[in-house]
Image (spheres, helix red, strand yellow):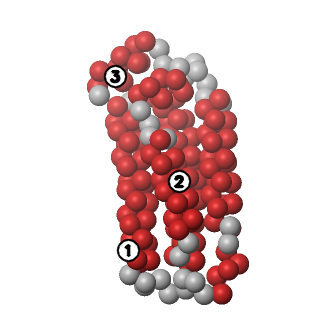
Amino acid sequence: MIEKYKQLQLLHRALCGGVALFMVFASFLKLKGMLPFAGTDQVEIFSGVGVLVFFATAIASRMMYSNQLQTIDQSLPAEQKLDAYRGAFIIRISLLEGGTIINLLMFMLKASWLSLGVCFLGLVLMLISRPDVVTLREALHLSADEQAELSGAL
């Protein structure tokens, strides 16, 4: 159980780190004036699309995560509940990452600081959704023994 929890944390760090690195790279390109399409009329069609996509994916990620947590059978052993939680978490973080990366692409196409701000919001939401012991306890309704096992190994 501890190994699966650590894998979730590693996955979370990797996805957040990748998005943050991409944001830094895109900002560097913007500041150096190296974005090829920025400010041209060819990309005006993208106005607002990235923001709408981000909010749609953020809402969908929250709804799907909640729905999947509600379907977890509480009579299962902790290992199997954690597996179900992992699936819900991966879908949640993937949808948030997708909306954030789409806005990074919009930023690279439009050079709009609004798109980068939405990316920052996406990164913050990804960071907030970090799997921790308290979240696992609440989401999986772990017994006292399972909670002690999880807390003691960390």
Q: From the image, state whether disc 2 or disc 3 is nearer to you.
A: 2
Residue located beneath label 1 in the image: 28
Residue drawn at 38 percent across, 66 percent down = 24
**Dot 3 surroundings within 10 Å: few (below 14), some, or many (20 or more)?**
few
Distance from label 2 to label 3 (Cα)? 29 Å
Residue 151, relative to residue 85: is it above or below? above
Q: Is residue 105 visible?
A: no
Return the disc, 2 or 1, that comes first in the chain's sequence.
1
Neighbours of disc 2 within 10 Å: few (<14), some (14-19), many (20+): many
Q: Depth check: 31 or 26 in front?
A: 31
Q: Earlier in the sequence, mark 3 or mark 1?
A: 1
**Quick one: 81 or 49, which is closer to the camera?**
49
Q: CA distance from mark 2 to mark 1?
A: 19 Å
Q: Quadrant of residue 1?
A: top left
Query: Label for residue 122?
Result: 2
Is label 3 in a helix, a strand or a loop?
helix
Relative image position of residue 107 (x, y in whole percent)? 54, 72
